Image: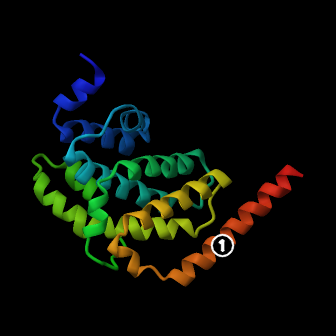
Amino acid sequence: MTASAVYDAVEPIIVWREMFSALEEKQDDTMLRWIITALPQKDEEIAAVHIPVVLDHLLQSAKVRLPDPTMSTSRLISLSLDLARHAARGLFTHAPVSSAEQSTDLASSLYKAQTVDVDACRLLVVDQAVPCIVRNIFDLAVRPTPSVKDQLAMLELVVWTLDTEAGAISTIVGTTWIRSLVEQLSTVSQKHWDSAS
């Protein structure tokens, strides 16, 4: 039996609960990164619930850690980009416009509860997590990052968000984040040229 067959046969909540536990308790993203990159993500529940919930959690974590130029920040940004690429794009298009600054901790609610109503979580993902994901991506994109690679990954997350045509984009003050983004890219470019000289 292949890893893909086992992954497809097990209830998604069980696998994603274990991955979240590894992230939360051990700061270990190895299993999550391998599953996202090595196995096809065909299950609708995974794309519509688990990936957005973990993405929201990672972006919240990145916002807290971003001033700290450690490898963990780079890994969080990189993993967020990998997850975003596998999220159900329709969620973002149909999510309500919300100016919510921070979502409730859906990941803890979903993965630490004894019983889980995945359908109720699906609604919370659309109503709470998706608007927060959009806001967090734009908030992180205008902050200084530890490296050029991180800044480019954040820019790729912004482009991905714009491509989803998320309604929550309308809550972003465009002139502010564009100005900040240009300043960040200018700083990154200057650092790159200084190191190349």
121 left or right of 93 in image: left
- Amino acid at pointer 1: Val
- At a point 43% along the width and 34% down the height, the residue shown is 30
Query: Is residue 147 at least partly visible in the picture?
Result: no
- At a point 30% along the width and 67% down the height, the residue shown is 93
Residue 35 image offset from top left, x and y in percent = 36, 34
Q: In the picture shown, does residue 188 fall above or below 13?
A: below
**Residue count near mark 1 (Cα–Cα under 10 Å), binned few <14, some 14–19, many ≥20:** few
Q: In the picture shown, does residue 151 fall above or below 11?
A: below
| Residue found at the far top of this picture | 1
How many numbered circles does the render carry?
A: 1
Residue 99 image offset from top left, x and y in percent = 34, 79
- At a point 29% along the width and 40% down the height, the residue shown is 41
User: Residue 91, located in which quarter of the rendered image?
Assistant: bottom left
Give the secondary structure at mark 1: helix
**What colouring does the structure picture have?**
rainbow
Q: Which residue is mark 1?
A: 182
Q: In the picture shown, does residue 171 fall above or below 53?
A: below
Look at the image and tell me in which quarter the N terminus lies: top left
Q: Which residue is more in the foreground, 9 or 23?
A: 9
Query: Is residue 27 at least partly visible in the picture?
Result: yes
60 left or right of 139 in image: left
- At a point 59% along the width and 45% down the height, the residue shown is 71
Residue 147 image offset from top left, x and y in percent = 66, 53
User: Residue 38, located in which quarter of the rendered image?
Assistant: top left
Q: In the picture shown, does residue 196 fall above or below 169?
A: above
